[in-house]
């Protein structure tokens, strides 16, 4: 039931008039060891904020975060340090995330110093070279500076830096969306290989479903601070139930023109994402939903978690055993 609400400044005459932005508003999920959970939604839906909150890098307004049974929601100062090592982040912008005045050797090596993971210059250098090899960078690159590298190489540096801390969990915040399409697959494959080799757990934030398809075991779709659907990847891509997930999937171009013409769902999502300052009443998706009824405008649906792990937050959806949800949605 994680909540991250940001207070907005009021006006001079009415200082309390600011209200708040409910960036994350009651989100619940679990992350299994060794899996990749995708977190997908349009910009402003709260996905990055959720990732930051899990890492305890942004204040939590409500709910709890547990790591292997330990409640880490209120850890502070010194107590946060082991957590800072165990959970790392890979950023969207490999250009902004690296200090331009530092050599690669020191960028990647910094976590080794901070968390006292090696002793002595020689062991330090050796460990950095090992990490560089792990992500496909050549040893002689360690004396160079970030601006001398391409986008893909910089992201490799960012990944090596995250790995230096020997983390268990990595939040990947749109790690390929700033890269050329041709480079994206290389980085995704690298992340996949590293996961297998090192037993890593990923929360993989992305703004479109196409990117996460080949790396995620499960996918969670967010809209305006809420999770609207969660399922294993296979189910989510072949049998999406929430109208928003269906619309997001329809927006992915199908390379085969014959398949494209057989599309069943209209690819358009009407309108814009509403402001999280004044979110719509009832179901947050109702102003854009083709299936919205009067109930949707008044009553917020809750995420129905079913035995098979397929959860859908929509009044139209009933778990598979009780009805045929796909025909129900289609017949509205
Ligand atoms: Fe659409 Fe209603 Fe379902 Fe919301 S609850 S997604 S408005 S049908
Ligand atoms: Mg973001």
Image (spheres, grey):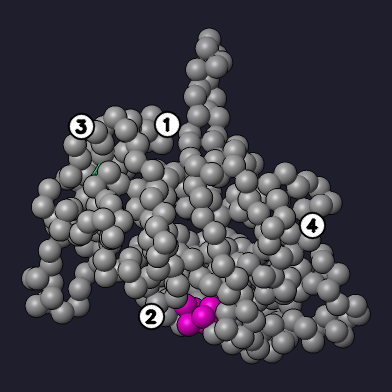
The alpha-carbon separation of the residues under discs 4 and 1 comes to 34 Å
Q: Which residue is most to the front?
A: 322
Question: Which span is picked out in magenta?
Answer: 187-192
Q: Which sits earlier in the primary sequence, circle 2 or circle 4?
A: 4
Question: Does the closest atom of ligand 1 sit within 8 Å of the Cβ of label 3?
Answer: no
Q: Which sits earlier in the primary sequence, circle 3 or circle 4?
A: 4
Question: Residue drawn 48% across and 82% down?
Answer: 189
Question: Residue drawn 82% across and 66% down?
Answer: 115
Which of the numbered marks, if any, corresponds to residue 182? Answer: 2
Circle 4 residue: 81
The alpha-carbon separation of the residues under discs 3 and 1 comes to 23 Å
Question: Residue drawn 64% across and 81% down?
Answer: 198
Circle 3 residue: 294
Q: Quadrant of the N terminus?
A: top right
Which of the numbered marks, if any, corresponds to residue 321? Answer: none
Secondary structure of residue under mark 2: helix
Secondary structure of residue under mark 3: helix
């Amino acid at each position: 039931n994680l909540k991250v609400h940001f207070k907005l400044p009021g006006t001079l005459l009415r200082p309390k008039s600011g209200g708040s932005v409910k960036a994350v508003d009651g989100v619940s999920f679990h992350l299994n060891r060794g899996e990749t959970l995708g977190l997908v939604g349009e910009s402003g839906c709260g996905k990055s904020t959720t990732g930051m909150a899990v890492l305890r890098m942004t204040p939590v307004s409500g709910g709890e975060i547990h790591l292997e049974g330990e409640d880490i929601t209120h850890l502070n100062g010194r107590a946060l340090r082991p957590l800072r090592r165990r959970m790392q982040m890979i950023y969207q912008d490999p250009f902004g995330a690296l200090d331009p005045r530092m050599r690669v050797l020191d960028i990647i090596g910094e976590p080794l110093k901070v968390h006292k993971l090696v002793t002595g210059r020689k062991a330090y250098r050796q460990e950095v070279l090992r990490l560089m090899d792990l992500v496909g960078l050549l040893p002689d690159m360690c004396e160079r500076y970030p601006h001398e590298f391409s986008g893909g190489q910089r992201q490799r540096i960012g990944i090596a830096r995250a790995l230096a801390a020997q983390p268990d969990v990595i939040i990947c915040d749109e790690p390929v969306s700033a890269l050329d399409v041709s480079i994206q697959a290389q980085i995704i494959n690298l992340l996949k290989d590293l996961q297998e080799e090192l037993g890593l757990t990923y929360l993989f934030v992305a703004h479109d479903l196409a990117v996460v398809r080949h790396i995620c075991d499960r996918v969670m779709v967010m809209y305006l601070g809420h999770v609207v659907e969660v399922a294993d990847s296979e189910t989510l891509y072949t049998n999406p139930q929430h109208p928003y997930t269906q619309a997001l999937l329809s927006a992915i171009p199908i390379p085969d023109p014959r398949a494209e013409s057989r599309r069943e769902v209209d690819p358009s999502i009407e309108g814009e994402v509403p402001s999280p300052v004044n979110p719509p009443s009832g179901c947050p998706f109702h102003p854009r939903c083709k299936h919205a009824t009067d109930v949707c405008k008044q009553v917020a649906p809750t995420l129905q978690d079913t035995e098979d792990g397929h959860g859908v937050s929509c009044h139209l959806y009933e778990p598979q055993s009780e009805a045929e949800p796909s025909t129900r949605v289609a017949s509205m």
